[in-house]
Image (cartoon, rainbow, N blue to C red):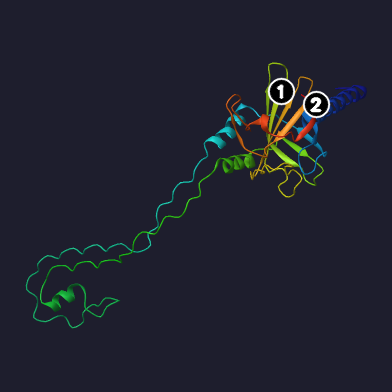
Amino acid sequence: MLSHASRRVLLSVCVLTGVLAVSVLTLAQTSTKGPIARFTATTDNVANPGQAVRIELFAWSNDTDRDEFAKAWTNPVQPVQPAAADAGGGRGGRGGRGGRGGAAPAAAPAAAVTDANAAAPVGGAAQAARGGGGRGGRGARGGGGGDAAPLPVIPVTPSMSLASALQKAPSVGMLWTSETVGYSIRYAYRVPQPDGSEHIILATDRRLGAWNDFWKSAGTAPTSDYRFSIVELRLSAAGVGEGKVSLGSINVDSGVKSIALENYTNLPVVLKAVKKQIVK
């Protein structure tokens, strides 16, 4: 048996091991919760220029995410055309012909069976009343109603399809401004360039300035009515640069196979003095 002193030493070792394990686990959880990339910028060429913007990313989107969103834009899944509803009854089938029977009895039974919806006798009693087994009656014709017009189907546009895909995707970051609520980033794709610079393509699940004029373009160009926003940052190797937002059209960049701003060079700079602070 262990002595009292030995038990105390063993207990101390177990407690120390547990404390170390908890500390390592806490440190690991804390490090994974922190942002892997942070960017700061200032708004420009919008209704509220000079406003501070902070972007924090907690994960990078991979090539599978890239392909999924690109496909949502280029190949929207269309709803199935519903079958036309039958507005009325079709034509009733013809009744089978009865076989020729033998001679009927001289008189019909006193109590003939009657149909629930008609006063005339039916079945064998009716045949007997008519004087013999005759041909079966023809089935009644149904109503002559035509087919109803098919329900209208609203086609799914590229922007509708991409908006739906972004809504279903998990959040990978946040974009913060002086607005009360931030914008959840559902796509963050990093495109390194040969000279050490990089392009970063972001997509929010709601349009920037959806409920105010904070992001309204200061120019005469109309603002897009997308339900989301695409933000593209272009940074030098030193981690400084500019950013532009989908005030106009977007498309799929054939070079990187990702959704991106269309005609980037012709768009006004919306995020100036962009600086990269943390990258993991």
Task: Pick the quarter of the image with the C terminus.
Answer: top right
Q: Quadrant of residue 149?
A: bottom left
Q: Residues within 10 Å of mark 1 (few under 14, many from 20)?
A: some
Q: Is residue 140 left or right of residue 1?
A: left
Query: Mark 2 against mark 1, which lies toward the viewer?
Result: 1
Q: Quadrant of residue 225?
A: top right
Q: List the single residue furthest toward the bottom.
A: 110
Q: Which residue is mark 1?
A: 198
Viewer-closest of 193 and 77 = 193
Secondary structure state at the residue bearing disc 1: strand
Q: Which residue is mark 2?
A: 278
Secondary structure state at the residue bearing disc 2: strand
Task: Pick the quarter of the image with the N terminus.
Answer: top right
Residue 114 x %, y %: 25, 78
Viewer-closest of 236 and 10 = 236
At 42% from the left and 55% from the top, the residue drawn is 150
Q: Is residue 162 left or right of residue 29?
A: left
Q: Gap between marks 2 and 1, in whole Å?
A: 14 Å
Viewer-closest of 154 and 110 = 154
At 89% from the left and 25% from the top, the residue drawn is 12
Tell me which amino acid carries mark 1.
Answer: Glu
Tell me which amino acid carries mark 2.
Answer: Ile
Residue 41 x %, y %: 80, 33
